[in-house]
Image (cartoon, grey):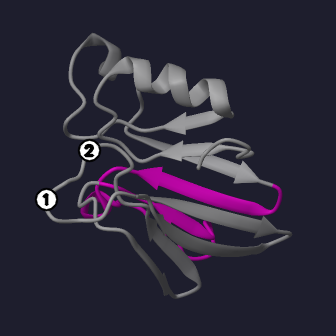
Amino acid sequence: MLRGADRIIHAGDIGKPEILDELGALAPLTAVRGNNDRGRWAAQVPESAVVRIGKVAIYVLHNLAELDIDPVGKYKVVVSGHSHKPIVKERDGVLYVNPGSAGPRRFTLPVAVGELKISGDKVRARIHELA
């Protein structure tokens, strides 16, 4: 699913550093640390990140409940993980995306990835469930 992506954004709970190497081999990678990422390798992964793609600014963090900025007017998209529950929701002009978990199934949630299609300053988001 990620082959051919222009960029990959990982919203945390990476699991092991080899995942970063594998994803980075597919496309430029931005990753943030999740609450399950521990150890020396994880300390090198930031807690939040900003990705700019053309006119679109994307704020990335693991736990949306820890969002300590007001993204309105600054960021077009906020990408988060933590709950592993795939969702796309727009509020006050900001698109909130949780792509779910592409790794091992979490709880009874689907295995999924999110996709952002960016054209100029417009963003569309979709969730893709993986078999």
Task: Judge by depth and name the residue closer to the eye, 77 or 114.
Answer: 114
**In the image, what residue occupies the spot 31% across and 22% down?**
16
Most extreme residue toward the bottom is 92
- Is residue 104 positioned above or below 65 on the image? above
- Describe residue 106's horizontal placement relative to residue 22 as left or right: left
- Give the quarter of the image for residue 39: top left
- Give the quarter of the image for residue 124: bottom right
Number of other residues with Cα within 10 Å of mark 2, as a class: few under 14, some 14 to 19, many 20 or more: few
- Describe residue 95's horizontal placement relative to residue 106 as left or right: right
Task: Quickly name the residue at label 2.
Answer: 104
Figure label count: 2
Q: Residue 82 — which label?
A: none
Residue 85 in the image, given as x and y percentages of width and height: 29, 67
Task: Judge by depth and name the residue closer to the eye, 71 or 22.
Answer: 22
- Describe residue 86's horizontal placement relative to residue 73 as left or right: left
Magenta-drawn segment: 54-81
- Is residue 54 positioned above or below 92 on the image? above
Q: Is residue 57 magenta?
A: yes
Amino acid type assigned to the residue bearing label 2 in the image: Pro
Residue 90 in the image, given as x and y percentages of width and height: 50, 85
- Give the quarter of the image for residue 82: bottom left
Q: Residue 107 — which label?
A: 1
Can residue 32 be seen?
A: yes
Can residue 70 be seen?
A: no
Task: Judge by depth and name the residue closer to the eye, 117 or 46.
Answer: 117
